[in-house]
Image (tube, helix red, strand yellow):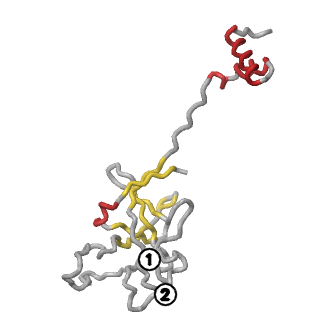
Amino acid sequence: MSRHVSNDLKARARDLAGREGIPYSAALARLRAPSAGRSHPQPAEPAETFEYLFVRLPVPDLQDARPCESCLGTGREHAVLGSEHALLFIRSDGGRPDMGVEVACDICHGCGRAVHDPEGCGYPHTDPWREPGEDDEDDEDRAPVCLSCHGHKFNYVAAFPEGDDGPQAGIVTFIRMPCGCTEDEMTLIREVAV
C-alpha cells in the first residue's frame, strides 16, 4: 500500500534533494518526519538567572602583618567555584531578592592575619570584639563613625546554615553581616544559574 504524496510535498522534496545533494526518497522521508513541521529552529529558552543583594565590604588592613594562609589576608572564606568568595544567602522578606553575605575565615576569625597579637590587632574578629560601652574614645578631629559597626561596615553574626534536611546540627558559621549604614552601597547582582 502506498502513501499519497501531495504535489506540494513532492516539489519541496525535489527542491531539498537538489539543494543538499541527497536522494529524493531521503528528502521525502526528512520532510515527513514529525520534526519537519517546524520550518525554523526553535529559539533557545532564556537562561535562568539568580538575583541577590550584595554589599562589597572592605578587606582588613594588615598593617605589614603576615597574611593568613587560608584566606590570603581577605578575612573571608575560600573562594568557591565561579565565585570570588564564599557567600551565605539570607532570605529576604517582602518579595525582595535574597542577600548574599560573606562568610568569615575559620582560621584567622576574619582579621586576615596569620599571627594574632595578644593585645589585639585593631581589627574585629568573629569573637565578641566590643563590650557594651567600650566605644573608642571621643576624638573631635575624627569624622563621626557608625555606632553599630564602628566604621567597619559590618558586624560578625553567628549563622546556622541549612542543608537539604534543615539546619545542620552543631555547625556554626560566622558571616560578615553588612551594617545598616551600608544600605546605599547595596547592589543587585544577577548571575546565570548553573
For marks 2 and 1, the one nearer the N-term is 1
Q: Residues within 10 Å of mark 2 (few under 14, many from 20)?
A: few
Tell me which residue sits at (46%, 75%) in the image: 75
x 52%, y 57%: residue: 164
Which residue is at the far bottom? 118
The residue that label 1 is drawn on is 110
Q: Which image quadrant for residue 133? A: bottom left
The residue that label 2 is drawn on is 115
Kindly indicate the quadrant of the structure image that contains residue 175.
bottom left
Where's residue 184, x and y in %?
30, 60
Crowdedness near tag 1: few (<14), some (14–19) or many (≥20) residues, C-alpha within 10 Å: many
Callout 2 amino acid: Val
Identity of the residue furthest to the left in this view: 140
Tell me residue 139's x, y (percent): 21, 84
Quadrant of the frame with the N terminus: top right
- Image location of residue 178, percent across then percent down: 35, 66
Give the image location of residue 21, x and y in percent.
78, 23
